[in-house]
Image (cartoon, rainbow, N blue to C red):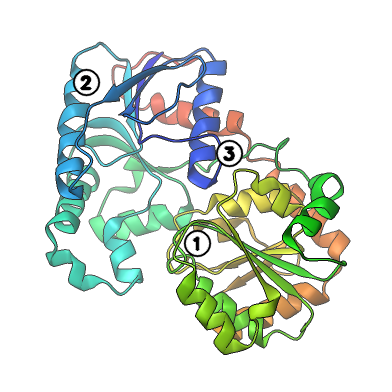
Amino acid sequence: MRIALICRPFVFHGGVETATAGLIGELVRQGHSIDLITTRGQPEVPGVNVRALDIPGHPSLVRLLAFGVAARRAIRSRPYDLVQSHERCLAQDIYRAGEGTHRGYLAAMGRRWARADPYHRTVMWLERRIFSLDAARQIVAISRLGKAEIERLFGTPRERVTVVHNGVDLERFHPDSREKFGAQTRQELGLGGEGWTVLFVGSGFERKGLGPLLEGFALARDRQARLIVAGKGRIEPYRLVAERLGIAERVVWAGPRPDVERLYGVADVVALPARYEPFGNVHLEALASGVPVLSSAAAGGAELITAGQNGRVVQEVTGAAIARALDQIRDADPVRLRMAARAAATPFTYAAQVDAFGMVYRRIPGTIDVH
Protein backbone atom coordinates (compact mmCIF):
# COMPACT_ATOMS: atom_id res chain seq x y z
CA MET A 1 0.00 0.00 0.00
CA ARG A 2 1.25 3.47 -0.83
CA ILE A 3 0.79 5.64 2.25
CA ALA A 4 1.30 9.36 2.71
CA LEU A 5 2.21 9.92 6.35
CA ILE A 6 2.06 13.54 7.51
CA CYS A 7 4.29 14.20 10.49
CA ARG A 8 6.52 16.90 11.93
CA PRO A 9 10.28 16.20 11.85
CA PHE A 10 11.39 13.50 14.27
CA VAL A 11 14.60 11.83 15.36
CA PHE A 12 15.29 8.31 16.52
CA HIS A 13 15.43 9.00 20.23
CA GLY A 14 13.09 10.41 22.81
CA GLY A 15 9.44 9.76 23.59
CA VAL A 16 6.96 10.42 20.82
CA GLU A 17 9.74 10.64 18.20
CA THR A 18 10.93 7.15 19.00
CA ALA A 19 7.38 5.84 18.70
CA THR A 20 6.95 7.46 15.29
CA ALA A 21 10.28 6.16 14.03
CA GLY A 22 9.41 2.65 15.19
CA LEU A 23 5.98 2.73 13.56
CA ILE A 24 7.35 3.94 10.22
CA GLY A 25 10.15 1.39 10.30
CA GLU A 26 7.67 -1.43 10.85
CA LEU A 27 5.37 -0.18 8.06
CA VAL A 28 8.35 -0.30 5.70
CA ARG A 29 9.38 -3.73 6.97
CA GLN A 30 5.90 -5.04 6.22
CA GLY A 31 6.20 -3.87 2.62
CA HIS A 32 4.31 -0.56 2.56
CA SER A 33 5.60 2.33 0.43
CA ILE A 34 5.82 5.42 2.64
CA ASP A 35 6.04 9.08 1.63
CA LEU A 36 6.82 11.09 4.75
CA ILE A 37 5.33 14.56 4.31
CA THR A 38 7.13 16.81 6.75
CA THR A 39 9.17 20.01 6.92
CA ARG A 40 12.80 20.97 6.59
CA GLY A 41 14.96 19.54 9.33
CA GLN A 42 13.75 15.97 8.97
CA PRO A 43 16.74 13.62 8.64
CA GLU A 44 16.69 10.89 6.04
CA VAL A 45 14.67 7.83 7.05
CA PRO A 46 15.78 4.43 5.72
CA GLY A 47 13.37 3.04 3.11
CA VAL A 48 11.18 6.17 3.16
CA ASN A 49 10.68 8.95 0.61
CA VAL A 50 10.94 12.18 2.61
CA ARG A 51 8.96 15.07 1.10
CA ALA A 52 10.09 18.13 3.03
CA LEU A 53 7.75 21.12 2.69
CA ASP A 54 9.10 24.66 2.72
CA ILE A 55 7.18 26.23 5.60
CA PRO A 56 7.83 29.61 7.33
CA GLY A 57 9.35 29.15 10.76
CA HIS A 58 7.46 31.96 12.50
CA PRO A 59 5.04 33.08 13.71
CA SER A 60 3.34 29.93 15.01
CA LEU A 61 -0.07 30.70 13.48
CA VAL A 62 1.39 31.26 10.02
CA ARG A 63 3.42 28.07 10.31
CA LEU A 64 0.35 26.09 11.37
CA LEU A 65 -1.82 27.30 8.48
CA ALA A 66 0.98 27.13 5.91
CA PHE A 67 1.73 23.54 6.83
CA GLY A 68 -1.93 22.55 6.50
CA VAL A 69 -2.24 24.12 3.05
CA ALA A 70 1.09 22.74 1.82
CA ALA A 71 0.34 19.23 3.12
CA ARG A 72 -3.04 19.19 1.35
CA ARG A 73 -1.35 20.28 -1.88
CA ALA A 74 1.27 17.55 -1.45
CA ILE A 75 -1.22 14.72 -1.00
CA ARG A 76 -3.19 15.89 -4.01
CA SER A 77 -0.09 15.91 -6.21
CA ARG A 78 0.43 12.13 -6.15
CA PRO A 79 -1.83 9.08 -6.00
CA TYR A 80 -1.95 7.52 -2.53
CA ASP A 81 -3.93 4.55 -1.29
CA LEU A 82 -4.24 6.21 2.10
CA VAL A 83 -3.32 9.45 3.89
CA GLN A 84 -2.45 9.16 7.57
CA SER A 85 -1.72 12.31 9.54
CA HIS A 86 -0.10 12.73 12.94
CA GLU A 87 -0.73 16.47 12.69
CA ARG A 88 -3.94 18.51 12.66
CA CYS A 89 -4.42 19.05 8.92
CA LEU A 90 -7.16 20.15 6.56
CA ALA A 91 -7.73 16.68 5.12
CA GLN A 92 -6.64 13.10 5.85
CA ASP A 93 -8.11 9.62 5.80
CA ILE A 94 -6.85 8.83 9.30
CA TYR A 95 -5.89 11.26 12.03
CA ARG A 96 -3.75 9.89 14.85
CA ALA A 97 -4.51 11.98 17.93
CA GLY A 98 -1.09 11.52 19.50
CA GLU A 99 -1.34 14.82 21.37
CA GLY A 100 -4.83 14.19 22.68
CA THR A 101 -7.05 17.24 22.22
CA HIS A 102 -5.97 20.84 22.48
CA ARG A 103 -9.26 21.70 24.14
CA GLY A 104 -8.68 19.05 26.80
CA TYR A 105 -5.07 20.16 27.29
CA LEU A 106 -6.00 23.81 27.86
CA ALA A 107 -8.68 22.81 30.37
CA ALA A 108 -6.33 20.46 32.27
CA MET A 109 -3.66 23.15 32.49
CA GLY A 110 -6.13 25.81 33.62
CA ARG A 111 -5.60 27.89 30.49
CA ARG A 112 -9.13 28.46 29.31
CA TRP A 113 -8.16 32.08 28.70
CA ALA A 114 -5.95 30.90 25.83
CA ARG A 115 -9.05 30.11 23.78
CA ALA A 116 -9.16 33.80 22.82
CA ASP A 117 -5.65 33.62 21.36
CA PRO A 118 -5.66 33.35 17.51
CA TYR A 119 -3.23 30.43 17.48
CA HIS A 120 -5.15 28.36 20.03
CA ARG A 121 -8.46 29.23 18.34
CA THR A 122 -7.09 27.95 15.02
CA VAL A 123 -5.83 24.70 16.54
CA MET A 124 -9.26 24.09 18.08
CA TRP A 125 -10.94 24.96 14.76
CA LEU A 126 -8.84 22.29 13.06
CA GLU A 127 -9.78 19.84 15.81
CA ARG A 128 -13.47 20.49 15.30
CA ARG A 129 -13.06 19.84 11.57
CA ILE A 130 -11.37 16.54 12.33
CA PHE A 131 -13.41 15.22 15.26
CA SER A 132 -16.85 16.70 14.59
CA LEU A 133 -16.98 17.04 10.80
CA ASP A 134 -15.39 15.10 7.96
CA ALA A 135 -11.76 16.24 7.76
CA ALA A 136 -10.80 12.66 8.73
CA ARG A 137 -12.73 9.47 8.08
CA GLN A 138 -11.19 7.59 11.00
CA ILE A 139 -9.61 8.76 14.26
CA VAL A 140 -6.90 6.84 16.11
CA ALA A 141 -6.52 7.55 19.82
CA ILE A 142 -3.42 6.24 21.58
CA SER A 143 -5.21 5.31 24.81
CA ARG A 144 -8.69 4.51 26.07
CA LEU A 145 -8.50 7.76 28.02
CA GLY A 146 -7.91 9.67 24.79
CA LYS A 147 -10.77 7.94 23.00
CA ALA A 148 -13.18 8.81 25.81
CA GLU A 149 -12.01 12.43 25.80
CA ILE A 150 -12.56 12.85 22.05
CA GLU A 151 -16.03 11.33 22.21
CA ARG A 152 -16.98 13.39 25.26
CA LEU A 153 -15.73 16.76 24.06
CA PHE A 154 -16.71 16.53 20.40
CA GLY A 155 -19.56 14.04 20.23
CA THR A 156 -17.55 11.92 17.82
CA PRO A 157 -19.31 8.59 17.08
CA ARG A 158 -17.62 5.69 18.89
CA GLU A 159 -17.17 3.75 15.65
CA ARG A 160 -14.99 6.53 14.23
CA VAL A 161 -12.46 6.36 17.08
CA THR A 162 -10.15 3.36 17.51
CA VAL A 163 -7.49 2.87 20.16
CA VAL A 164 -4.06 1.91 18.81
CA HIS A 165 -1.43 1.91 21.52
CA ASN A 166 2.15 2.88 20.77
CA GLY A 167 4.85 0.31 20.34
CA VAL A 168 8.21 0.17 22.09
CA ASP A 169 11.64 -1.16 21.17
CA LEU A 170 11.89 -4.18 23.45
CA GLU A 171 15.57 -4.68 22.68
CA ARG A 172 16.71 -1.13 23.33
CA PHE A 173 14.57 -0.87 26.46
CA HIS A 174 15.37 -4.04 28.36
CA PRO A 175 15.94 -5.03 32.00
CA ASP A 176 19.55 -5.84 31.21
CA SER A 177 20.20 -2.08 31.05
CA ARG A 178 20.68 -2.23 34.81
CA GLU A 179 23.59 -4.63 34.48
CA LYS A 180 24.99 -3.06 31.27
CA PHE A 181 24.79 0.61 32.18
CA GLY A 182 23.88 0.94 35.83
CA ALA A 183 27.23 1.28 37.59
CA GLN A 184 28.83 3.48 34.92
CA THR A 185 25.80 5.76 34.62
CA ARG A 186 25.55 6.20 38.39
CA GLN A 187 29.17 7.24 38.41
CA GLU A 188 28.67 9.68 35.50
CA LEU A 189 25.73 11.30 37.29
CA GLY A 190 27.57 11.48 40.61
CA LEU A 191 25.04 9.25 42.35
CA GLY A 192 27.45 6.91 44.06
CA GLY A 193 26.51 3.86 46.09
CA GLU A 194 23.27 1.98 45.58
CA GLY A 195 20.71 4.38 47.02
CA TRP A 196 17.09 4.15 45.88
CA THR A 197 16.62 6.24 42.72
CA VAL A 198 13.55 7.96 41.27
CA LEU A 199 13.66 8.99 37.61
CA PHE A 200 11.60 11.66 35.86
CA VAL A 201 11.83 11.75 32.05
CA GLY A 202 9.96 14.28 29.97
CA SER A 203 10.01 17.64 28.24
CA GLY A 204 7.35 20.09 29.32
CA PHE A 205 7.99 20.04 33.06
CA GLU A 206 4.78 21.77 34.12
CA ARG A 207 2.46 19.52 32.13
CA LYS A 208 4.27 16.38 33.22
CA GLY A 209 4.07 17.19 36.90
CA LEU A 210 7.64 17.91 37.93
CA GLY A 211 6.57 20.48 40.54
CA PRO A 212 4.27 18.10 42.46
CA LEU A 213 6.85 15.33 42.08
CA LEU A 214 9.48 17.45 43.81
CA GLU A 215 7.01 18.08 46.64
CA GLY A 216 6.18 14.38 46.91
CA PHE A 217 9.84 13.38 46.80
CA ALA A 218 10.52 15.78 49.68
CA LEU A 219 7.71 14.20 51.73
CA ALA A 220 8.65 10.56 51.02
CA ARG A 221 10.19 8.55 53.88
CA ASP A 222 13.52 7.62 52.27
CA ARG A 223 15.73 10.63 52.97
CA GLN A 224 18.68 9.02 51.18
CA ALA A 225 16.83 8.55 47.87
CA ARG A 226 17.93 10.47 44.77
CA LEU A 227 15.84 12.02 42.01
CA ILE A 228 17.10 12.28 38.42
CA VAL A 229 15.34 14.82 36.19
CA ALA A 230 15.90 14.26 32.46
CA GLY A 231 14.33 16.24 29.64
CA LYS A 232 14.18 19.65 28.03
CA GLY A 233 12.69 22.62 29.85
CA ARG A 234 13.35 25.63 32.06
CA ILE A 235 15.22 24.11 34.99
CA GLU A 236 15.84 27.19 37.12
CA PRO A 237 12.32 27.58 38.60
CA TYR A 238 12.40 23.93 39.66
CA ARG A 239 15.89 24.25 41.12
CA LEU A 240 14.49 26.97 43.35
CA VAL A 241 11.61 24.69 44.37
CA ALA A 242 14.10 21.93 45.24
CA GLU A 243 16.12 24.37 47.34
CA ARG A 244 13.01 25.60 49.15
CA LEU A 245 12.03 22.00 49.92
CA GLY A 246 15.51 21.15 51.19
CA ILE A 247 16.19 18.44 48.60
CA ALA A 248 18.54 20.29 46.23
CA GLU A 249 21.46 18.03 47.14
CA ARG A 250 19.44 14.94 46.26
CA VAL A 251 18.27 16.07 42.80
CA VAL A 252 20.37 15.47 39.67
CA TRP A 253 19.53 17.56 36.59
CA ALA A 254 20.49 15.34 33.65
CA GLY A 255 19.05 17.46 30.81
CA PRO A 256 17.83 15.95 27.51
CA ARG A 257 19.47 12.60 26.78
CA PRO A 258 19.51 10.63 23.51
CA ASP A 259 20.63 7.56 25.50
CA VAL A 260 17.73 7.54 27.96
CA GLU A 261 17.92 3.74 28.21
CA ARG A 262 21.03 4.25 30.35
CA LEU A 263 18.95 6.25 32.84
CA TYR A 264 16.39 3.47 33.12
CA GLY A 265 19.33 1.27 34.04
CA VAL A 266 19.83 3.19 37.30
CA ALA A 267 16.17 3.83 38.17
CA ASP A 268 14.21 1.97 40.83
CA VAL A 269 11.02 3.76 39.81
CA VAL A 270 10.02 6.13 37.01
CA ALA A 271 7.63 8.89 38.13
CA LEU A 272 5.41 10.75 35.66
CA PRO A 273 2.55 12.36 37.62
CA ALA A 274 1.35 14.30 34.58
CA ARG A 275 -1.45 16.83 34.59
CA TYR A 276 -2.22 15.96 30.95
CA GLU A 277 -0.67 13.11 28.96
CA PRO A 278 -2.49 11.30 26.11
CA PHE A 279 -0.28 8.25 26.64
CA GLY A 280 3.28 8.84 27.75
CA ASN A 281 5.77 6.66 25.90
CA VAL A 282 7.99 6.92 28.97
CA HIS A 283 5.55 4.51 30.64
CA LEU A 284 6.25 1.87 28.00
CA GLU A 285 10.01 2.48 27.92
CA ALA A 286 10.28 2.20 31.69
CA LEU A 287 8.14 -0.93 31.94
CA ALA A 288 10.05 -2.56 29.06
CA SER A 289 13.24 -1.78 30.99
CA GLY A 290 11.85 -3.59 34.01
CA VAL A 291 11.25 -0.37 35.99
CA PRO A 292 7.95 0.16 37.87
CA VAL A 293 6.06 3.37 37.13
CA LEU A 294 4.33 5.95 39.28
CA SER A 295 1.72 7.52 37.01
CA SER A 296 -1.19 9.90 37.37
CA ALA A 297 -4.70 8.93 36.31
CA ALA A 298 -4.48 11.84 33.82
CA ALA A 299 -1.98 9.86 31.73
CA GLY A 300 -3.14 7.30 29.20
CA GLY A 301 -0.13 5.18 30.07
CA ALA A 302 -1.73 4.53 33.46
CA GLU A 303 -3.77 1.88 31.62
CA LEU A 304 -0.66 -0.30 31.75
CA ILE A 305 -0.20 0.02 35.52
CA THR A 306 -1.64 -2.49 37.98
CA ALA A 307 -1.35 -1.09 41.49
CA GLY A 308 0.97 -3.10 43.68
CA GLN A 309 2.27 -5.17 40.78
CA ASN A 310 4.19 -2.89 38.42
CA GLY A 311 3.69 0.56 39.95
CA ARG A 312 1.09 2.94 41.31
CA VAL A 313 -1.44 5.42 39.92
CA VAL A 314 -2.29 8.61 41.79
CA GLN A 315 -5.77 10.00 41.27
CA GLU A 316 -4.73 13.51 42.35
CA VAL A 317 -1.48 15.15 41.34
CA THR A 318 -0.47 16.38 44.79
CA GLY A 319 2.71 16.09 46.79
CA ALA A 320 0.99 14.04 49.50
CA ALA A 321 -0.47 11.51 47.05
CA ILE A 322 2.84 11.17 45.21
CA ALA A 323 4.74 10.65 48.48
CA ARG A 324 2.39 7.83 49.51
CA ALA A 325 2.80 6.14 46.14
CA LEU A 326 6.60 6.44 46.28
CA ASP A 327 6.63 4.91 49.77
CA GLN A 328 4.40 2.03 48.63
CA ILE A 329 6.69 1.26 45.69
CA ARG A 330 9.75 1.60 47.95
CA ASP A 331 8.30 -0.99 50.35
CA ALA A 332 7.43 -3.53 47.61
CA ASP A 333 9.59 -6.45 46.46
CA PRO A 334 11.86 -4.94 43.76
CA VAL A 335 12.37 -8.24 41.92
CA ARG A 336 8.64 -8.85 41.57
CA LEU A 337 8.11 -5.25 40.47
CA ARG A 338 10.72 -5.55 37.74
CA MET A 339 9.35 -8.85 36.43
CA ALA A 340 5.79 -7.54 36.35
CA ALA A 341 6.91 -4.31 34.68
CA ARG A 342 8.64 -6.12 31.83
CA ALA A 343 5.71 -8.50 31.37
CA ALA A 344 3.30 -5.57 31.05
CA ALA A 345 5.29 -4.06 28.17
CA THR A 346 6.03 -7.12 26.05
CA PRO A 347 2.74 -7.11 24.06
CA PHE A 348 3.39 -3.57 22.83
CA THR A 349 5.57 -4.24 19.80
CA TYR A 350 5.72 -2.13 16.66
CA ALA A 351 4.40 -5.13 14.71
CA ALA A 352 1.33 -5.22 16.95
CA GLN A 353 0.88 -1.47 16.43
CA VAL A 354 1.01 -1.82 12.64
CA ASP A 355 -1.40 -4.78 12.73
CA ALA A 356 -3.84 -2.62 14.69
CA PHE A 357 -3.47 0.19 12.17
CA GLY A 358 -4.12 -2.35 9.42
CA MET A 359 -7.55 -3.02 10.89
CA VAL A 360 -8.26 0.72 10.73
CA TYR A 361 -6.99 0.92 7.14
CA ARG A 362 -9.48 -1.70 6.04
CA ARG A 363 -12.32 0.48 7.27
CA ILE A 364 -11.44 3.24 4.79
CA PRO A 365 -13.56 2.87 1.63
CA GLY A 366 -11.48 2.44 -1.49
CA THR A 367 -8.27 1.28 0.16
CA ILE A 368 -6.70 -1.96 -0.95
CA ASP A 369 -6.44 -4.95 1.39
CA VAL A 370 -3.26 -4.65 3.45
CA HIS A 371 -2.65 -8.42 3.51
Q: Residue at x 66, y 87 (%)?
A: 219
> Alpha-carbon neighbours of circle 1 within 10 Å: few (<14), some, or many (≥20)?
many
The tag earlier along the polypeptide, 1 or 2, is 2
Judge whether 297 appears above or below 342 on screen. below
Q: What residue type is labelled 1?
A: Ala
- Expressed as whole percent of the image width and height from the top left, the position of residue 70 reads 18, 28
Q: Please give the name of the residue rendered at 49% of the width and 35% of the height, measured from the top-left corner.
A: 11
Which sits earlier in the primary sequence, circle 1 or circle 3? 3
In front of the other: 356 or 178 = 178
Which quadrant of the view contains residue 369? top left
Q: Earlier in the sequence, mark 3 or mark 2?
A: 2
Callout 3 amino acid:
Gly
Q: Tell me the residue that label 1 is attached to.
A: 299
Residue where numbered disc 2 is placed:
74
Q: How far across and how far down the image is residue 234, in percent?
A: 44, 65
Within-10-Å neighbours for mark 2: few <14, some 14–19, many 20+: some
Three-letter residue code for mark 2? Ala
Residue under pointer 3: 167
